[in-house]
Amino acid sequence: PVVREKPFLKWTGTKYAVFVPALRSNSSGTTWGGGSPAGQTLALSGFYIAQSSKDTAATINKALGKGKHVLFTPGVYHLSEPIRVNNANTVLLGLGLATLQADSGTVALKVADVDGVKVAGLLIDAGETNSPLLMEMGPSGSNANHAANPSSLHDVFFRVGGAAVGKATVSLQVNSANVIGDDLWIWRGDHSHGVGWNVNTADNGLVVNGANVTMYGLFVEHYQKYQTL
């Protein structure tokens, strides 16, 4: 009924850019099957190029506050406060499953109740101190209608344990309306490191409070109360 394909890095022949496919309604098949797909090409100069060796939530938030998009290069980004997306149409694009690690019980990523945010290619990892949420799409009580320009999540994965001890009450909470999910794997670890019923605790994988939320390819596993509410 409504879908947007994942933003991607492309080579124009002279430089890199990010292509953001357009929203489609009542569609089937790929965007590129009939020729050049509809969408918008964003110059890489409009992106802050994040590097895990030097960047923190503070440096990333400073760039977002200046109206930049963010391209996360591969690595693990340790966050002591949330990354905050407040501007409409912002693109967060991770390469190589760039990982946002929620340290000290923080929320890793908070997106305001605005139009057209695209989050793609990120792994969001719980830290050893329990986080109430790992990612929030819109604050509690969000009620704006975003049908004309919904926000979307593409290849966004959540992990509570598995790599190490991790704890998070809820992995993803969607309060905004009209959000689109495109391939989400929301996982409480059942094997490997930092796993045990009282070790990597997590109540719910996905909590949806927003209206008209659409999910394609939704996988939620092993949570201790409900996988999806």
Image (spheres, rainbow, N blue to C red):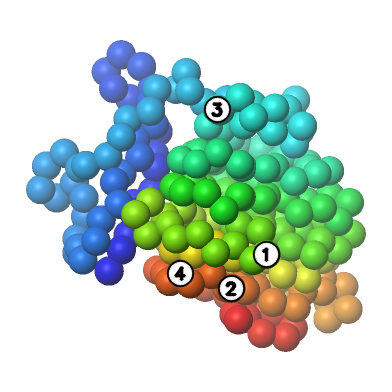
Q: CA distance from mark 2 to mark 1?
A: 8 Å
Tags 4 and 2 touching, CB below 8 Å: no
Say if 54 sits above or below 202 in the image: above
Nearer mark to the viewer, of 3 and 2: 2
Q: Residues within 10 Å of mark 3 (few under 14, many from 20)?
A: many
Say if 127 sits above or below 204 in the image: above
Q: Amino acid at mark 2?
A: Asn
Q: Amino acid at mark 3?
A: Lys
Say if 76 sits above or below 217 in the image: above
The numbered dot on residue 140 is 1
The numbered dot on residue 68 is 3
Residue highlighted by disc 4? 213
Tags 3 and 2 touching, CB below 8 Å: no
Say if 12 sits above or below 69 in the image: above
Q: Is residue 183 visible?
A: no
Q: CA distance from mark 4 to mark 1?
A: 15 Å
Q: Position of residue 139 (x, y in %)?
A: 66, 59
Q: Amino acid at mark 1?
A: Ser
Q: CA distance from mark 4 to mark 2?
A: 9 Å
Q: Position of residue 76 (x, y in %)?
A: 71, 41
Residue highlighted by disc 2? 209
Nearer mark to the viewer, of 3 and 1: 1
Mark with earlier residue (4, 3): 3
Nearer mark to the viewer, of 4 and 1: 1
User: Which quadrant is the C terminus positioned in?
Assistant: bottom right
> Which residue occupies 47% across, 18% down?
45
Q: Quadrant of residue 228?
A: bottom right
